[in-house]
Amino acid sequence: MSNEAPKIGLDNVVIAEVLSDDSNGIVYGEVIPLKGAVNATVNPNSDVATDFADNGAFFASNNRGNSELSLEMIDVDPAVLAKMLGMKRANGITRETGMDQSPYFAFGFRVWIAGTDAEGKNRYQLVWYAKGKFSVPETGGETKRDSLDFRHLNMSGQFVATQFVPEGEDTGTICMHCRTDDADVSQTTVTNWFNQPIVSLAVDTGAVTLTAELRDTPYNDLVITGSKAGGSSFNFASSSVKLNETVIVADENGAPINGSLVIGSAGVSPTITFTPEDGENAIETVTVTAGVKDTFGVSVTPLSLKVSV
């Protein structure tokens, strides 16, 4: 079966805030769906320049500029839009100023491709742009006439390479994409594509096991440490690490203990550190469910453990 086919649809538009990006790794917040996608077009501003010598074309080289997104949506939830644009919002009211600075976000979407794959299923192109910012969209309206004229929200974005450089690469990542009808793409990759933005070709679906111990610190922090079956570098997906949902810390009576969870940097032994609030009872047990996932979308092996200093 030939893979060549036109693109005929668009859905699954999502964003995820870039919480940090440096040489040690890139960390994203939870993936937020944007419903009502109409059009998403990215211009990579790519060209080929030719140099001339010996009375003719002598050398050609590629060049890529900034990646420009044109996004058309039916609408975007006001709270999500304010978050995308770095605007303050309270009591249902959004405040715009000339000093607003939008955070960096990853931007993902799914393109429907005509035809079917080898199993007779619909086929798609899956896309993540790793890091960019959105601009403030135009606002306004027009009086209703005899026939309806639907007006959509149009906004643009600019995407750049990550500061984080994946192992074995020379530069940061701008975009990652794959097709579901490609025989080299695993079903695990397809299933987990939108769990977290992807910035590396090394998609490790190996099992994740956990250990946990109390640290003898002023706060008696609880440190949960993970490891991959193959010993590769990874991190925990921040959107999956939720206190009293996927990570439950309890006292000797089984009552949940309040506190904060902090995910460390990516590595072969990444950590989740729990610090209890002042006045809480001593930590007795920790439970981590399969709801905690790594940044490749792999669920951890559940852990339930009695801990002590």
Image (tube, rainbow, N blue to C red):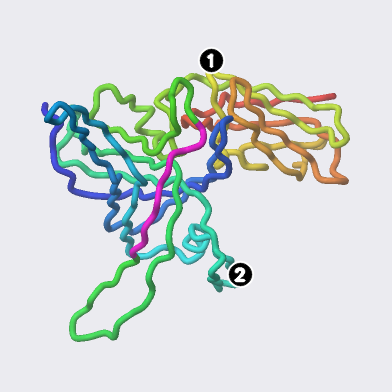
Q: Nearer the viewer, residue 179 or 19?
A: 19
Q: Where is residue 237, by image quadrant?
A: top right
Q: Secondary structure at mark 2?
A: strand
Residue 185: % across, % down? 31, 25
Residue 67 in the image: above or below residue 172:
below
The residues colored magenta run 154-164
Q: Amino acid at mark 2?
A: Ala
Q: Nearer the viewer, residue 57 or 129?
A: 57
Q: Which residue is mark 2?
A: 90
Q: Is residue 223 magenta?
A: no
Crowd rating for badge 2 (residues with CA inside 10 Å; few <14, some 14–19, many 20+) = few
Quarter of the image where the C terminus is located: top right
Say which residue appears at 39% left-offset and 26% top-offset: 201
Residue 148 in the image: above or below residue 65:
below
Q: Which residue is mark 1?
A: 229
Q: Are marks 2 and 1 in contact (CB under 8 Å)?
A: no
Say which residue appears at 57% left-offset and 35% top-offset: 22
User: In the rendered view, does 251 fall on the left or right side of 132?
Assistant: right
User: In the rendered view, does 55 fall on the left or right side of 84?
Assistant: left
Crowd rating for badge 1 (residues with CA inside 10 Å; few <14, some 14–19, many 20+) = few
Residue 111: % across, % down? 26, 44
Quarter of the image where the N terminus is located: top left
Q: Residue furthest top?
A: 230
